[in-house]
Structure formats: C-alpha cells, structure tokens
Amino acid sequence: MKKALLHGLTAGIFATIAAIVFNSIYSEFMYVDYTAVVNTGSITGACMFSCVLASVVYFLLSKFMKKGADILFNILLLLATFASFAGAFSINLPLDVEAPEFFLGLAIPLHLFPALFWLATKPLYYK
C-alpha cells in the first residue's frame, strides 16, 4: 500500500505542475481569467485526490484479482476520466466572466492530466 500511495502522490505532483503550467499558458495566450472557477488550489486538490484515488483502486484490484486487473483498471480510469468531463460541461460560470466559450478549452485538458501522469509514472512503481 505504501508503494501505491507514493505512486499516487508522485503522479499527483507531476499532474499538478503540468496543469498549473497549462492553466497559466492558456490564460495568458487566450486573454481569459477563470480563477473564480479554476484556481491553483482547485487544480492541486483535484490532481492529488484523483491520482491517489487511482492508486488505491489499482492496489485493491491488483490485490483481489490475479488476472485482468490492469485491463479492468484501465477501463475504469478511462470511464472515470470521460465522466469527469460532465462537470466541465455542466458548470455555470459567473456572469462577469469574459469569453465563456473558451472555458472548455481549458477545463477538458485539465481533466486529462491526472490519468496521463498516473499512467506515465506507473512503470516507476510496478513491473
């Protein structure tokens, strides 16, 4: 379990850094400010929580399933990532936000970072 939590924390840290950098670049180049909805704290919390949760789920699946744990986990991760898009599509932005049409261009990639970095760091912890 210790290895799983360490993996989740590592992936979460990398995902957080990438997401914050992406948020800064996107906001700068598109001349938008969505800090009322998406800020450093919410990005950090979402990335860390989802990566640690993914590690716990992977650990439990690996422990109780001898075969097929990887494929089942990958399917669950894919479904959870796509399901998280629903939150971005359903959010009600404050009325004073300029260029609300660009919000999904920021939000959707941010939802991909935790899964991508969890999968990218997996070989460092599991053989």
Image (cartoon, rainbow, N blue to C red):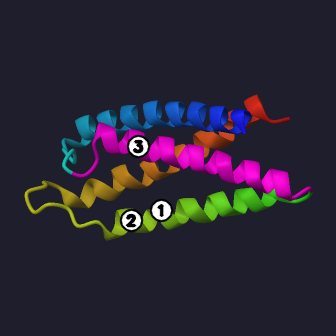
Label 1 Cα crowd, 10 Å radius (few <14 / some 14-19 / many 20+): some
Marks 2 and 3, Cα distance to the nearest angstrom?
Answer: 15 Å
In the image as oriented, which residue stretches furthest toward the right?
66
- The span picked out in magenta is 37-66
Q: Amino acid at mark 2?
A: Gly
Residue, disc 2: 87
Q: Residue at x 45, y 63 (%)?
A: 85
Residue 45 disc label? 3
Magenta-drawn stretch contains 38: yes
Is residue 18 found left or right of 9 in the rendered image? left
Q: Amino acid at mark 1?
A: Ser
Residue, disc 1: 84
| Quarter containing the C terminus | top right
Q: Amino acid at mark 3?
A: Gly
Q: Position of residue 29 (x, y in %)?
A: 26, 37
Q: Is residue 70 visible?
A: no
In the image as oriented, which residue stretches furthest toward the front?
1
Q: Position of residue 88 (x, y in %)?
A: 36, 62
